Image (cartoon, rainbow, N blue to C red):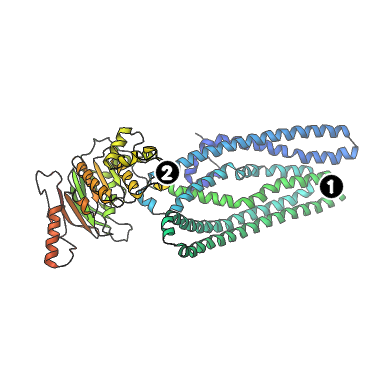
Amino acid sequence: MPEITGPISRFFATPERAWLKDFLEPLQTMFKEVLLVSLFVNILAVAVPVFVLQVYDRVVFHAGMTTLQGLVIGMVIVIAFDFILRQTRSKVMQSVALRLDIAVGRHLFEKIMALPLRSLESRPASYWQLLFRDVEAVRNTLSGVSAILCADLPFAVLFLTVVFLIAWPVAWVLVIIFVVFVVLAWRSGQVVAAAAEEEKTKIINRDGLITEMIMGRSTIKALAMADHLRPLWEDRQAEAIEQSLIRGTKTDSFVNAGHGLTMFTTVAMTTVGAVAIMNQELTIGGLIAANMLSGRLLGPLNQLVGAWRNFVSFGQSVDRLGTIFSEAEDKSDTAIALERPKGRITFEETTFKYGENAPPVVDDVKLDIAPGGVTAIMGANGSGKTTLLKLLLGLYTPVSGRVLLDGADIKQFSRKDLAHWIGYAPQECILFNGTVRDNIAQTRPDAEDGEIVRASTLAQAHDMLINLPDGYGTLVGEGGSLLSGGMRQRIAIARALLGSPPVIVMDEPSGSLDKDAEANLRQTLSELGKTHTVIVVTHSPILLQACRNVIIMDKGRIRAAGPIQKVMDAMAAAQTESGKPVKAIPLKVTKVDPQDKDSISETADQ
């Protein structure tokens, strides 16, 4: 495949822009076709000034009607051919736009899906939305008016050459103006670039607030928070508008300067031309033709001054996309296919922080959970329960230590492998607009109906779903808004159970369930614990009845772990003795019952 070389290659010199080269190289043939067509279009553009020159200098002076007829017929053919060429160029650019849209858009989607969770959480939702608008900016610049402008700019030399041939006395005016236009365009790029970047930052801040307001619309309505949010919105909107006005003012200044320079060019050329005509160095037809050619010469440069904002936005979009494309991804493949795990979970001195200088959220956790059984994780808010689950799921990477599944470091497994082996029902039940069946089968689109029914039955959702008018074909709405919180939670649990993964992780699964549904879920957990390793974050006394083991966390450390009755008895005894709530329980449990397959071992702080 041929490579992009020459001056254009300097654009790709930075790592943030190198990615675009791979997408443009397959389109080089199309771009060459556009340049070839543009060559003929610009050659034909010379025909009109030459026609005017001939009419004024020959037809009018010699009253040559036959010559006029021939020239008119020739110009009709030229105009028709010009139309065909322009249509051809437009179709080629549409093909370029389509290919870029599909290729870059797909690559961005796949990249976002492959990024680690911490990378996704490090930026606001509005930033990720902006990236897809950046794809549109790249597409429009490389296949729209800006691309045509770039294709026409090199042929300015052609028009300048023709002016030298037919009206050399005024050609030097164009050379001087041409240099001034280049300097104006260069300065415009510098000024507008800084203003556009600042404007983009303000827009991201404003859109971030809009995203939060849309996500929390129910809370905003229920608590009548409009009066509180209005000043925040107005401040960010005002900042965005102010920066937009600043950028617009600077852009307009350069555009207006370009128009003024164009008018001055006409005046200067006409003045110099008039003197040349009086000195019999130039004809009237030559002056008129030169003025027409100056429009073709300076037109693209004038557009360049006005369109520089598009080129600046294009560069910023390419840089932003390049930054994302260069980030590390989750592991996408596994070196060797392993058998289905039995479900032993081990944490080896595992520590995790949200920042380099931040305190540990999970601090030196040492834990071994045998296959099978139901294990509860308890602790106060902020004790590290959910973070521990995300480490187990492979969503977070430990700062130190390891997380093992059946003795194998989970870092070696792909995201897809872990998703098939570890089912997850999060505390926030996120559903996607579509049918109930689609939402349950999202992790396994090829799942058979029997598997979906079995998973929803285990989640205590089947009886409720078949009573709906459309059953499993019922639309859930945006984010599941058409269903109750309890129904959403049951569907999320069914999604976690689909495919019967050996390890099942649930974060506060009974948060939206009533007492009867909670009792049914307890029975489900008991049944699942016979053949699966079930880990559930809960403080529900009902669900705790299904748990054989419990892990108690406090400030990122495991303070107690073992069979639930022993741990609870130890806590009660310690509290009775001290008369205060227990923050740390000295407890070491290892293989409590040799026949208990759900045994858990952990060395807690003494």
Name the residue: 80% across, 46% down. 288
Q: CA distance from mark 1 to mark 2?
A: 76 Å
Q: Residues within 10 Å of mark 2 (few under 14, many from 20)?
A: some
Name the residue: 50% across, 41% down. 21
> On the rendered structure, is 433 left or right of 253?
left
> On the rendered structure, is 167 left or right of 104?
right
Name the residue: 48% across, 41% down. 104
Q: Specify the farthest residue to the bottom.
A: 579
The residue tagged with tag 2: helix, strand or loop?
Answer: loop
Residue 449: image location, x then y, percent: 33, 33
Vertical side of 195 occupied by 446: above or below: above
Question: As rendered, which of 143 and 43 lies closer to the eye?
Answer: 143
> On the rendered structure, is 73 left or right of 146?
right
Q: Amino acid at mark 1?
A: Glu
Label 1 belongs to which residue?
281
Quadrant assignment, res 420 = top left
> On the rendered structure, is 235 left or right of 49?
left
Q: Amino acid at mark 2?
A: Asn
Question: As rendered, which of 19 and 343 lies closer to the eye?
Answer: 343
Q: Is residue 348 visible?
A: no
Question: As rendered, which of 445 and 508 lies closer to the eye?
Answer: 508
Label 2 belongs to which residue?
433
Residue 357: image location, x then y, percent: 32, 61
- Closer to the chain start, of discs 1 and 2, is 1
The residue tagged with tag 1: helix, strand or loop?
Answer: loop
Residue 399: image location, x then y, percent: 28, 53
